[in-house]
Image (cartoon, rainbow, N blue to C red):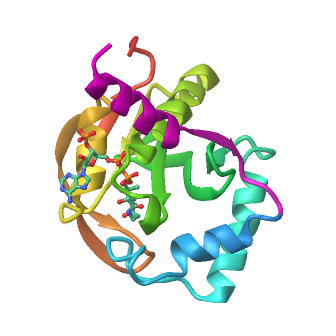
């Protein structure tokens, strides 16, 4: 093993993450992720306290209602909660699909954390066996999210106008992953 390989192993150990189901105490994490202007630049801006509380309640109910799963991302080295990833039932061009979304706190970005966490969530979505297709709709102006889709084997379908948040339309890329095909 070269010195370079050793450094890379150290880095991947330092940046290792796992995902855990979203829980009742996770409103503070949600507020850091979606209540912050810099974190929501490509998501229509920060949510209000009321919107965050409603979203927290939706995340708590998602799994028990069988409409998807939301996870928090845990940094293994420190135990810190550093992000979220989740997928939920949606409809796209009249087809029932899963839609996926993700978010990693600024201080932890650029270390491969979203890549590792989203890959873990995709394994669970595949094992659910519910829908064939899972879509992501990142803004065309969001290079890391588009790079993430490409890296994780999604197919770029087309550019489209996507309503998010409700009432406002964003120019997005429609990325699709076939969950029934071996990865
Ligand atoms: C999108 C986001 C989750 C990525 O998190 P991250 O942990 O930094 O992502 P990773 O480190 O796993 O990097 C993912 C890919 O993006 C690439 N990337 C990162 N910044 C980039 C940039 N400015 N331009 C182009 N590619 C970029 C990385 O190189 C990596 O690809 P690679 O492994 O092929 O090199 C993070 O930027 C974020 O939380 N943004 C705010 C929330 C958001 O916009 N969510 C999108 C909802 S669709």
Question: For the N terminus, which image quadrant?
Answer: top left
Question: For the C terminus, which image quadrant?
Answer: top left
Rendering quarter of residue 35: bottom right
Res 91 seen here = yes
Q: Position of residue 54 (x, y in %)?
A: 70, 75
From this view, report whether residue 98 is shown above or below residue 144. Answer: above
From this view, report whether residue 44 is shown above or below residue 142. Answer: below
Taking the view exactly as shown, the residue that stands out farthest to the front is 3
Q: Position of residue 34 (x, y in %)?
A: 53, 74
Q: Which residue: 41% across, 28% down?
A: 9
Q: Is residue 153 left or right of residue 181?
A: left
Q: Is residue 6 magenta?
A: yes
Name the foreground residue: 78 vs 65.
Answer: 78
Res 97 seen here = no
Q: Position of residue 66 (x, y in %)?
A: 73, 40
From this view, report whether residue 36 is shown above or below residue 151. Answer: below
Say how many tags the image has.
0
Name the foreground residue: 18 vs 141.
Answer: 18
Q: Is residue 75 left or right of residue 135?
A: right
Q: Which residue: 57% across, 58% down?
A: 82
From this view, report whether residue 65 is shown above or below residue 13. Answer: below
**Boundaries of the magenta span:** 1-24
Q: Which residue: 54% across, 70% down?
A: 33
Q: Position of residue 87 (x, y in %)?
A: 55, 45
Q: Is residue 65 magenta?
A: no
Q: Is residue 8 left or right of residue 29?
A: left
Name the foreground residue: 157 vs 74.
Answer: 74
Q: Is residue 63 left or right of residue 158?
A: right
């Amino acid at each position: 093993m070269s010195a370079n390989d050793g450094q890379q192993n150290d880095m991947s150990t330092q940046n290792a993450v796992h995902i855990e189901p979203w829980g009742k105490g996770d409103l503070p994490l949600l507020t850091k992720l979606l209540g912050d202007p810099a974190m929501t630049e490509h998501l229509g801006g920060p949510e209000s306290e009321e919107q965050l509380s409603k979203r927290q309640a939706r995340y708590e109910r998602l799994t028990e209602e069988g409409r998807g799963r939301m996870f928090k991302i845990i940094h293994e080295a420190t135990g810190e909660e550093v992000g979220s990833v989740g997928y939920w039932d949606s409809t796209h061009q009249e087809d029932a699909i899963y839609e996926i979304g993700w978010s990693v706190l600024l201080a932890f970005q650029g270390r491969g954390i979203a890549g590792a966490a989203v890959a873990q969530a995709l394994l669970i979505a595949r094992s659910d066996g519910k829908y064939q297709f899972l879509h992501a709709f990142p803004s065309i102006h969001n290079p890391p999210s588009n790079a993430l889709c490409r890296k994780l084997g999604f197919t770029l379908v087309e550019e489209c106008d996507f309503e998010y948040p409700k009432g406002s339309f964003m120019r997005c890329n429609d990325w699709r992953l076939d969950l029934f095909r071996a990865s």
